[in-house]
Image (tube, rainbow, N blue to C red):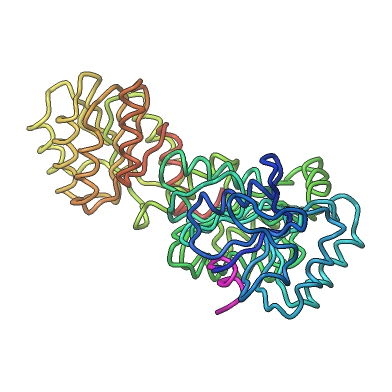
Amino acid sequence: MDTLTRIFKAESVAIVGASSNPEKRGHIILKNIIDGGFKGKVYPINPGTKEILGLPCYPSINEIPGKLDLLVISIPAKNVPEILRNAKGREIAGAIVISGGFREAGNLELENDLFAAARESGIRIIGPNCQGINFTPNKLCASWPLFIKQGSLAIISQSGTIGATLAEWAEEEEIGISGFVSLGNRIDIDESELLEFFGNDNNTKAIALYLEGVKDGQKFIRALKNVSNKKPVVVLKGGRTKRGREAAQSHTKSVAGNDLIFDAACRQFGGIKAEDIIDLYDISKAGSMLNKSVKSVFIITSSGGSGILATDYSELYGLEVPPLPQSLKGALTEELPSHCIINNPLDLTGDTDAQRFKLASRIASEENFCDCLILIFGDPIPGATEICTELKSSSPQEIVAVYLGGGEVGKAETKRLLQRGVITFPTPERAAKAIGKLIRQEA
């Protein structure tokens, strides 16, 4: 078993700096590991306490009996190298160093000592100055906040907050994540290794990546080229302006690099560039929920304006909105009320109900002239979930829902749609842009 697999699929975890104080990181992470349902062995380390959260507390790592896969370290930075040196000989796979106060605070010598200690002990490092990891297939949330919903989206982020925000949105929408890694200062394990890990992970269908700089350009390009051939890799880069690059330097001392070169590398080697955090989430979400590439769409809407916007953004982001074949146009004209506008987009108008959506969608699905049906529910339309769920199970096309302007009905239907695995967006622009960028491979 390779090192990263041992880290993410750890069977035993020690929390160095575990605390009885609910406000301390060492308490929060320990509690999240327990509350997340981790089935392995959990060892709090704190020489001043006998028990924390019902678990016996150990004075040091060397007092722990048996095998130990992973350390989570949340103690003052100056003490971290000694912890790693004392762990020499334990054959521990990795350490997540939550502690800050290294290079990002001007203490480069201390960070170099940390790296040397890790090499001496044979322990790989995630961090330091990071927010930890969460790998839901192993129910291992060595991070914060606690996210437990398992999905197929992996998040790798140089910013803990940005990564946690993506995970929070996925949890709220009940689509979940497969994993989350906060990179921190990246003194050892970097974005390229993690990209390869999630690229080979069967639980992961899409990868969201937030970077301020790349540690090793050639290594990253090799990983990106390899992984993007298997699954979507969506990249948001911070530090695109002069002041942004200066901010990146002060954050984790990243060298942000030339954004034009980074853009070109993404286009050439398969990375999908996101423009902002919402874009990063939407494209990654689409990549994790869609099963095949979408190149053409049929838009069915109760809102004429929303249909126009969906058409605009589809074409802007590389999706074809083909005219209806005469056979389909004739079938829809025969079955739908005369005031419906039979075109692509198909405007069912504001007096529509779920049954009219069902009828139009069934006829379009049987014709099978496009890759994807985008159903825009622009009013309080109960029953949208049943229509989309049935289509998802029976239609050869991908099914994408948009629900807006629906009030409380819309909120309830959106929640149910996502629970049933139907990809759903709050606006037509976000839907079209996300699925279009999956094939366009550029920002």
Magenta stretch encompasses residue 8: yes
User: Which sits in the foreground, 255 or 92?
Assistant: 92
User: Which sits in the foreground, 64 or 308?
Assistant: 64
Residue at coordinates 87% horizontally, 49% vertically from top-left? 105
User: Which sits in the foreground, 25 or 297?
Assistant: 25
117 vs 32, left or right, is: right
Q: Quadrant of residue 356?
A: top left
Q: Main secondary structure of the magenta part?
A: helix
Picture coordinates of residue 43, whole percent (x, y)? 63, 62
Picture coordinates of residue 320, whole percent (x, y)? 36, 46
140 vs 52, left or right, is: left
When the figure is inspected, residue 427 is found, relative to residue 134, above or below; the finding is above
Residue at coordinates 26% horizontally, 41% vertically from top-left? 323
The N terminus appears in which quarter of the rendering? Answer: bottom right
Q: Quadrant of residue 78?
A: bottom right
Picture coordinates of residue 231, whole percent (x, y)? 46, 62
Magenta stretch encompasses residue 138: no
Q: Which residues are magenta?
A: 1-9
Residue 357 in view in this figure: yes
